[in-house]
């Protein structure tokens, strides 16, 4: 089977990509508007970029009307955000945040999600997230126009909150204790509970 992405509709192209590019980590992004309104939304086109300087990225896709999401507006206004990781126990609350709420309405309040203050940025973090990365905006790259177009955000990490409960005896994050979830296609998710190790080749 060969897919000609030059002829696929944007929606079909997205679905094929989402079904194939798996598993995808989830960025549960908290932001604040210039007026002080909080927002919390999940994005599954997300990953780390580099440790020099510490940088991550996530992509926010415009809705079918081509309207920017609150996350996009807020970061454009304040240039700060927090990426919260999603453990299995918070999957339902994370998923609830994908709902379209009226502009300015807080998902923290609407879905009973506890927040906590950040240390270096204004947006709050998810109190029960095992890891929360505080970020200041490095840059935004616009890809496409209209419905399905994306704003790709690059954030410089300035602080991270790591729950003591996810640290192993060696002081490092234990993936079994972290217990994050990832996205597959459609409404499907995967846990990180089934793991295996492969020794990497020596690098000179």
Image (cartoon, rainbow, N blue to C red):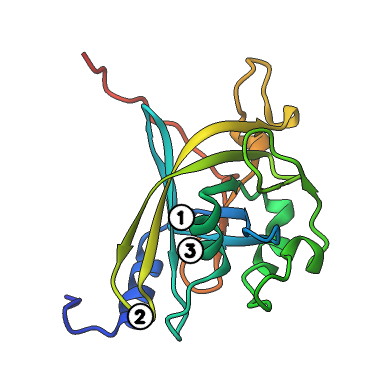
171 up-or-down from 13: above or below: above
Most distant residue in the front direction: 35
Residue marked by disc 3: 184
Mark 1 or 2: in front is: 2
Task: Tell me, yes or no, if residue 124 can be seen here.
Answer: yes
Q: Position of residue 10 (x, y in %)?
A: 31, 80
Does the residue at mark 1 contact the one at mark 2 (Cβ under 8 Å)?
Answer: no
Residue 171: x, y in percent? 64, 17
Between 198 and 85, the one lying in front of the other is 85
Residue at x 68%, y 35% (from the top left corner) = 177
Q: Nearer the viewer, mark 3 or mark 2?
A: 2
- The vertical placement of 166 against 116, above or below, is above
Tell me the distance, in whole angstroms, between the alpha carbons under discs 3 and 1. Answer: 7 Å
Report the residue marked by disc 1.
Answer: 24
Marks 3,1: beta carbons within 8 A: yes
The residue at 63%/15% (across/down) is 170
Classify mark 2: helix, strand or loop.
loop
Q: Which residue is mark 2?
A: 146
Q: What SS does tag 3 mark? A: loop
- Where is residue 195 drawn, in percent x and y? 52, 40
């Amino acid at each position: 089977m060969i897919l000609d992405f030059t002829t696929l509709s944007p929606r079909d192209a997205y679905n094929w990509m989402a079904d194939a590019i798996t598993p995808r980590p989830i960025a549960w992004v908290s932001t604040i508007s210039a007026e002080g309104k909080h927002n919390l939304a999940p994005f599954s086109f997300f990953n780390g970029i580099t440790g020099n300087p510490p940088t991550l990225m996530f992509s926010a896709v415009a809705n079918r009307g081509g309207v920017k999401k609150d996350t996009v507006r807020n970061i454009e206004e304040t240039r700060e955000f927090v990426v919260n990781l999603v453990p299995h126990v918070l999957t339902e609350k994370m998923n609830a945040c994908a709902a379209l709420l009226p502009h300015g309405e807080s998902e923290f309040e609407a879905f009973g999600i506890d927040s906590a203050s950040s240390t270096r940025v204004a947006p709050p973090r998810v109190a029960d997230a095992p890891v929360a990365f505080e970020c200041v905006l490095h840059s935004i790259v616009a890809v496409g126009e209209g419905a399905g177009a994306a704003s790709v955000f690059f954030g410089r990490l300035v602080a991270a909150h790591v729950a003591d409960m996810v640290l192993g005896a060696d002081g490092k994050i234990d993936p079994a204790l972290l217990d994050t979830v990832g996205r597959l296609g459609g409404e499907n998710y995967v846990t990180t509970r089934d793991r295996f190790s492969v020794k990497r080749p020596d690098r000179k």
